[in-house]
């Protein structure tokens, strides 16, 4: 199985982190191929960045389709242009937010999401409602960290995220945490061990969902909303 993981921003260090997290959970028969959306913003923090990354992301999706990738993971928690990606691709296309919160809903009756900047909170809240899980999501919290701070050696990002998890447990009474940024992917296991509850990384969840859908021989429906774009 060939799984193409596309980082919709242009930060190569983040792509390497994402690919490492995916490879850590993928089955032996899954070949992980990472791609960076060169030309996109360095990070995706808000609606403007989502729109600006979309042409570069869609170019990578089209290349993955031409290369006969079995499935695609769009490795950003804002799930940018996910519908457009599914119109282009024949195999499953999985976004991190949808994968992360749906995984959390299967292992806990409630969860809170911890993202980076406050401006991302309403974006994620809207996605949670769209995916039908607002009744299980206790709160979307911001750690007040820029996305690129997660890539800076010696930053206190892990401590800040840990402190927000402690607040979520005390104030939200949540049973699981979903990390709301692809750049947090490498922190999930140690944070779960430290706080004693499931901490869901969207990269790992999306990788395993993609693997399962391909294994079940399921492809993206081309009848209706995800039909191929019309020739114009």
Image (cartoon, helix red, strand yellow):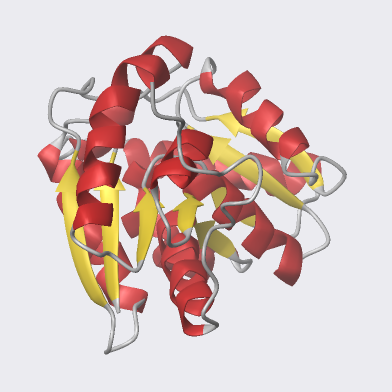
Give the total of numbered labels. Answer: 0
Residue 196 can be seen in this image: yes
**Drawn side of residue 32 relative to residue 177, left or right:** left
Q: Residue furthest right?
A: 135
**Which residue does the image show at 49% across and 38% down from the upper left?**
82
**Which residue does the image show at 50% across and 64% down from the upper left?**
205
Residue 149 can be seen in this image: no
In which image quadrant can residue 59 be found? Answer: top left
Above or below 151: residue 165: below
Q: Residue furthest top?
A: 48
Q: Residue furthest front?
A: 232
Picture quarter with the C terminus: top left
**Drawn side of residue 216 relative to residue 29, left or right:** right
Q: Position of residue 115 (x, y in %)?
A: 51, 34
**Which residue does the image show at 66% across and 43% down from the upper left?**
224
**Drawn side of residue 96 relative to residue 150, left or right:** right
Q: Position of residue 80 (x, y in %)?
A: 45, 31
In which image quadrant can residue 128 be found? Answer: top right
Q: Position of residue 45 (x, y in %)?
A: 40, 20
**Which residue does the image show at 57% across and 55% down from the upper left?**
100
- Along the viewing direction, whichever of 144 and 86 lies nearer the viewer: 86
């Amino acid at each position: 199985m060939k799984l193409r993981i596309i980082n919709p921003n242009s930060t190569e260090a983040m792509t390497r982190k994402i690919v490492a997290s995916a490879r850590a959970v993928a089955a032996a028969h899954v070949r992980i191929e990472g791609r960076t959306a060169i030309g996109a913003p360095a990070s995706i923090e808000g609606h403007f960045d989502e729109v600006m990354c979309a042409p570069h992301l869609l170019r990578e999706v089209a290349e993955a389709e031409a290369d006969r990738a079995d499935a695609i993971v769009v490795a950003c928690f804002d799930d940018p242009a996910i519908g457009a990606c599914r119109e282009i691709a024949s195999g499953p296309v999985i976004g991190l937010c949808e994968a992360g919160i749906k995984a959390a809903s299967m292992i806990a009756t409630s969860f809170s999401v911890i993202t980076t900047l406050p401006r991302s909170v309403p974006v994620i809240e809207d996605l949670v409602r769209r995916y039908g899980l607002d009744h299980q999501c206790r709160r979307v919290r911001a750690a007040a960290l820029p996305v690129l701070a997660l890539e800076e050696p010696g930053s206190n990002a892990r401590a800040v995220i840990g402190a927000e998890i402690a607040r979520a447990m005390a104030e939200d009474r949540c049973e699981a945490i979903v990390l709301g940024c692809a750049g947090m992917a490498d922190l999930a296991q140690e944070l779960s061990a430290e706080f004693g509850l499931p901490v869901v990384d969207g990269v790992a969840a999306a990788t395993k969902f993609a693997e399962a859908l391909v294994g079940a021989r399921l492809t993206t429906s081309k009848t209706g909303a995800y039909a191929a774009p019309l020739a114009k």
